Image: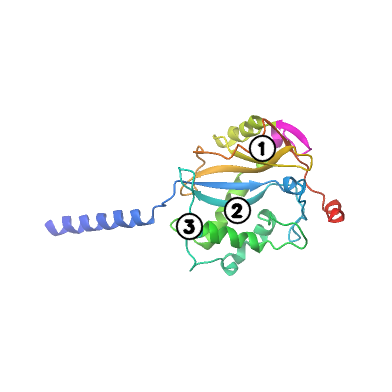
Amino acid sequence: MRGIIILSFLILQSLIVSSSQSAPDFNFFYWVNYWPGAICDSQKGCCPPTKRDKVSDFMIHGLWPQFNNGTWPAFCDQTNLFDISKVSDLISKMEKKWAEWGVWTCPSNDTNLWEHEWNKHGTCVQSVFNHHSYFQTNLKFKQKLNLLNILKQKGIKPNDGFYGLDEIKNAIKCVIGFAPGIECNEDVKGNKQLFQIYICLDNYAKEFVECPYVPDSSCASKIKFPKFPKKDSLLVSL
């Protein structure tokens, strides 16, 4: 009987140690999506990526681990850098939903953003994700949460109109239960416009949570929702 008790204790102790070793050492995730129109309507301008259909939609920027004190881990493992062969079955979806945002000339290279996101952020979350599951989780939330439709249902449309910052945040809060963070940039006339939306997730990227802090300081009380870029006109301007 004593042997059984000791064995049970050792198994329990092993499970506790294993759990503590695999627990994330960060507090939450930002899941960030950007609006292409805000890039193409800025001073720098842009050229839409060539490896996807030109569908009017928000695009994934990334899934970023964060600490509650406002800092974040980055570039945590130089021995496990991005390997596109590990996400080969996801490429077609990634090309449509996760296209390069920092592109100013054609043709674009979507792989650069995926590589950057894994090397900077993905390598810091290996207690939760491997290569494949990191990218798959981004796509899962993209499928689950259609930000453009959520805004449209509240009359907030990408038509170069101006909408209240709180109006935009509340539209999303009605769906996920928590207010997102909103990041703005400026159009060619200096108007603040909707650039990125920050959705907060728990440290296992399972559930939506309240954001400990959000990057709202770049916005005005009313911001522009720029039209989705028209490829032909952009190519002419370049």
Residue drawn where x is 50% and y is 56% of the image: 74
- Determine crowd level at label 2: few under 14, some 14-19, many 20+ residues with C-alpha closer than 10 A: some
Q: Position of residue 160 (x, y in %)?
A: 78, 37
Question: Judging from the image, what secondary structure is the residue with disc 3 in?
Answer: helix
**Left or right: 55 as drawn, with respect to 178:** right
Q: Which mark is residue 160?
A: none
Q: Which residues are magenta?
A: 150-163
Distance from disc 1 to disc 2, alpha carbons, whole Å, reads 17 Å
Amino acid beneath label 2: Leu
Q: Which corner quadrant of the image does residue 176 belong to?
A: top right
Name which of mark 1 and mark 3 comes first in the sequence: 3
**Left or right: 20 as drawn, with respect to 178:** left
Q: Which mark is residue 124?
A: 3
Q: Position of residue 4 (x, y in %)?
A: 17, 58
Q: Position of residue 170 (x, y in %)?
A: 61, 31
- Determine crowd level at label 3: few under 14, some 14-19, many 20+ residues with C-alpha closer than 10 A: many
Residue drawn where x is 64% and y is 33% of the image: 171
Label 1 close to label 2 by CB (< 8 Å): no
